[in-house]
Image (cartoon, helix red, strand yellow):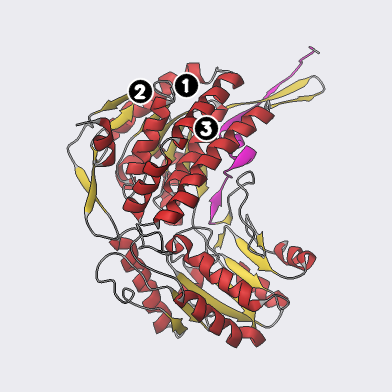
Amino acid sequence: MNRLSMVMHDLNKFYINGQWVEPNGQERLDVLNPATEQVVSRLSVGSPVDVDCAVQAASAAFEHFSQTDKPYRMALLERIIEQYQARIEELALATTEEMGAPIVFSRRAQVMAGLEHLTVALNVLKENDFTERLGTTTIVKEPVGVCGMITPWNWPLNQMACKVAPALAAGCTMVLKPSELAPRTAYIFAQILEDAGVPAGVFNLINGTGALVGAALSAHPLVDMISFTGSTRAGKQVSIAAAENVKRVSLELGGKSANIILDDVDFSTVITRSVKAVMSNTGQSCNARTKIVVPEHRLADTIEIAKAAAESIRVGDPMSDKTQMGPVASFQQWERVQAFIQQGIDQGALLVTGGLGRPAGLEKGCFVRPTVFAHVTPAMTIAQEEIFGPVVSIMAYKTEEEAIAIANSSIYGLSGGVCSADVQRAKRVAARLRTGMVHLNDAATDMRAPFGGYKQSGNGREWGRYGVDEFMETKAIFGDLSN
């Protein structure tokens, strides 16, 4: 079997200490294509023994790698970027097959997000020396140590790269556990690092479940930091497991974000754009602004525009260039979204379009109908829980104060938005939102800026200089009399 076929289909080996090795156990999991329901990969399930092997390798490699200089790590990142660029199409195809993102979206957004994080980390390394002088005190930033990384299936390359790239830039070593629903992208990513010459033990890859591998990684005494992206429920378990060793924990968790639409915008443009943004990636983005909060006197207009926008979305085969929305990533996720839609109906929200079941003409696969609810109140489940699917909740307000209260009435605080023809007015409202990020007029994210949230959306920050700092400790050296 050649290496490509092993990576693309038979994911039976782990990457530990610079070698592709057999796992300790014999358990296997099938990975289904959510559009076709066919098995596309079979992966090994790791054990605590595999985790220990990988952590020991990372720990042994840390002593040397942590002492490498900036030029060395810059050259390493440059080689990784070169190898990544050579495999963009392969990464896009794997993403689409594994988690259902339309192929155009995989190429344009999913894969490019990973590349941009690598590039940003390289630029951060070029532009910073991570030292500061305060009189005779020198303050230095040093690599935090061995890092355990647990990543999700919804943006697999984005989440791997925004952890691995800054950790490499900082001088850390690491063990990555990707989602068992999207493992092939991680295998290709590991090969990219291998081909770029990442030293043995610096990067290690183990597959498996969160309950077994994730828990063992979080609790391992030689792991200095855990960087986790996933649900708030799982993040709490990671924190509990990590607390025994008082290791650093960085959490990027759930969200239930609101987009406040003020009364001075072009509603046709803004509502259409907001609805389609939620449906992007089939609603499977933690920062999706799924609550569209509008003035009460514009509610009827909003409903009409949102209905047309949702019904214009082309749902279907994710391998078609014409498809705008593919399936959700698994049948478990499909059932979860269906249950939330049913709760919305049962609790009295107005089902504007979409609803239960698959879209017309799609007899199999994890496809969900683009769904819009209106007359949603803050007490409803669909206004409070992260659905992680293509479901929009339209909520009405009488005053700006009420709009802000609706946006903040959540256990989450990841993202939010404010749309207004007056940017200063939008900024005043944005300042009142208890979220880690706010998009003015649906502005795109900036990968140089910090990504993370307030409240139960997590702690710590990813992306850019803030992401590199997350993988560093701060040391004060007193009495430095040198010039």
Q: Position of residue 254 (x, y in %)?
A: 49, 57
Residue 220 appears in the figure: no
Figure quadrant of residue 44? top left
The three-letter amino acid code for the residue at tag 1 is: Phe
Marks 1 & 3, CB-CB < 8 Å contact? no
**What distance separates the C-alpha of mark 2 from that of mark 3?**
17 Å
Q: Position of residue 189 (x, y in %)?
A: 40, 36
Disc 2 vs disc 3: which is toward the camera?
A: 2
Nearer to us in this view, 289 or 223:
289
Q: Is residue 444 above or below residue 49?
A: below
Q: Position of residue 125 (x, y in %)?
A: 62, 29
Figure quadrant of residue 409? bottom right
Q: Secondary structure at mark 2?
A: loop
The three-letter amino acid code for the residue at tag 3 is: Ala
For marks 1 and 3 on the same chain, the one whose residue lies earlier in the sequence: 1
Residue under numbered circle 2: 18
For marks 1 and 2 on the same chain, the one whose residue lies earlier in the sequence: 2
Query: Can you tell which mark lies on residue 167?
Result: 3
Q: Secondary structure at mark 3?
A: helix
Q: Secondary structure at mark 1?
A: helix
Residue shown at 70% from the left, 75% from the top: 265
For marks 2 and 3 on the same chain, the one whose residue lies earlier in the sequence: 2
Does the segment drawn in magenta span residue 81? no
Residue under numbered circle 1: 62
Q: Position of residue 117 (x, y in %)?
A: 54, 40
Disc 1 vs disc 3: which is toward the camera?
A: 3
Residue shown at 52% from the left, 68% from the top: 276
Label 1 environment density (alpha carbons within 10 Å; few <14, some 14–19, many ≥20): many
**Where are the magenta residues, as a range?**
456-482
Q: Is residue 140 above or below residue 232?
A: above
Nearer to us in this view, 35 or 296:
35
